[in-house]
Image (spheres, rainbow, N blue to C red):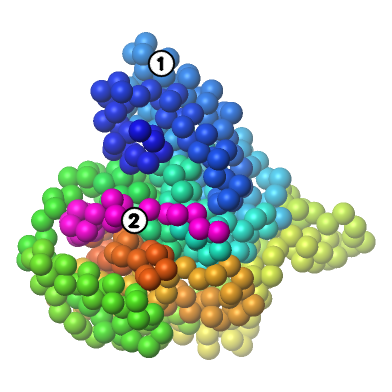
Amino acid sequence: MDITELTVHELQEKLKSKEITITQITKSYIDRINEKETDVQAFVTTLTDEAMEQAKEIQNKLEEGEIKGEFAGIPIGIKDNMCTKGVKTTCSSKMLENFVAPYSATVIEKLDKENIINLGKLNMDEFAMGGSTEYSYFKKTKNPWNLNKVPGGSSGGSAAAVAANLVPWALGSDTGGSIRQPASFCGVVGLKPTYGLVSRYGLVAFASSLDQIGPITKDVRDCAMLLNLIVGHDEKDTTSVERPKVDYTKSLKNDIKGLKIGVPKEFFTEGINEEVKDALEKSIEKYKELGAEIEEFSLDIAKYSLATYYIIGCAEASSNLGRFDGIRYTYRTPEFKSLKELYKKSRSEGFGDEVKRRIILGTYVLSSGYYDAYYKKAQQVRTLVMNEFNKGFEKYDIILTPTSPTVAFDIGSKTNNPLEMYLADICTVSVNIAGLPGISIPCGVDKEGMPIGMQLIGNKFCEETILNAAYTFEQAIKFRENYKPEFKK
């Protein structure tokens, strides 16, 4: 038995029956990291020694009856933009290369309370800006299905680590598709929760009105379990919402008879790869077999959403990244003659090209004379996008689209064409603009064996509906049983 092949709920069953121990689980993952990390390059910081010590301690406490908890001793990986006390939190940037967080993000505190073991911080596009994890200052993460392909981004390290069995599950963050798109590229499950459901306290901000932390897992049950652990109102985050506690695992009923699914025709037009379209059409037929009612409709927002997203996202990034000035906890240029030169050189040397591009664009759209023409108009279009979704949800329980217009592309094929890279977000950004929940699940592979993702979008706080629809589909096609990453070189 390969322990690292198991889902978290399978690990829990084997722990309960005492077939395996926490130390065995942790050692299996450390061995797997030692074996495959050189190929995948998913981690910025590994915490393997600390994890092994923690595993021994938790094992002893469990045996002595000092602690209880169904997640005690389960390992996890964390995207490197969530503050973790005493551990480097770099955002994969030279600017924060040596920053050790003095406190933990709320989601990390929640995991610590459950005695979950952190195996390390996972690679990402610098400050979460990118769709391929090629914009990391430290390394380029590879896709475990084919090491010449990107894993997606910006949570590419998280998705690749889960797909390669380096961690059983991981946390990512999603600003315009950064959980769902890499989940699609790597053949795993990725959920972007409703805005406000999960606290953003301790998440290094990219675009505050769009960012959301969420799970990346091997299957939908694990996704529901990790969501249970991280949701909840947080007084330290004024955008987090107070709601009654829900057990999302109870929504996994494997029954969708009568579920109304809307399929927006605009998401299946020019620009969507034929093999992706074909896989989605087969998935729609499968949903019909399972008892769902499916109807095509018009959701004419895709062409506006991308521009709206990049104006709002870059404007907020420009504001949020103003704090990285070379004065306090960031990279500081070694040579400067004045305060102005210190700022200029520290930021020029500390930020990568993509981050600088977005700061410049964001500063421009917020500047006097352009604010009304761009930023204000983008916010008005944002309201129109929300209204269009609201109309759709008056009729449908779920909206089904591709997660990405293509499968994972070759490393280096789009880095010289930022616009082409931005267009890869066409299917996901509208969900963030409207603050909705969206999940990506694998629905097939192309002729080269690369995974294809399907996106299910729900109304606000309707995670239970999309999780059950995803779970029912997953049980019907059994993707994990039929396909596995091959580490092709």
Report the residue marked by disc 2: 483
- What's the magenta bit mostly, secondary-structure-wise? helix
Foreground residue among 9 and 278: 278
| Residue visible at 30% across and 31% down in the picture | 12
Is residue 228 visible in the rendered structure shown here? Answer: no
Q: How dense is the environment of label 1, judged by Cα within 10 Å: few (below 14), some, or many (20 and up)?
A: few
In the rendered structure, does residue 478 fall within the stretch colored magenta? yes
Q: Residue at x 33, y 87 (%)?
A: 269
Disc tally is 2
Question: Please, what secondary structure does the residue beneath circle 2 have?
Answer: loop
Q: Which of 361/419 is in front?
A: 419
- Chain part drawn in magenta: 467-489
- In the image, what residue occupies the spot 75% across and 63% down? 347
What separation in Å lies between label 2 and label 1 (alpha carbons)? 38 Å
Query: Image height check: is 75 above or below 301?
Result: above
Please say if 253 is above or below 452.
Answer: above
Residue at image location 30% in from the left, 21% down from the top = 18
Q: Earlier in the sequence, mark 2 or mark 1?
A: 1
In percent of width and height, residue 368 lies at: 63, 83
Screen quadrant of the N terminus: top left
Q: Depth check: 334 or 180 in front? A: 180
Q: Position of residue 150 (x, y in %)?
A: 53, 64
Badge 1 is on which residue?
A: 61
Q: Residue 408 placed where, x, y %?
A: 47, 68
Q: Look at label 2 and name its amino acid.
A: Tyr
Under tag 1, what secondary structure? Answer: helix
Quarter of the view holding residue 293: bottom left
Number of other residues with Cα within 10 Å of mark 2, as a class: few under 14, some 14 to 19, many 20 or more: some
The answer to whether residue 219 shows anywhere in this view is yes
Q: Nearer the viewer, mark 2 or mark 1?
A: 2
Residue 359 vs residue 211: left or right? right
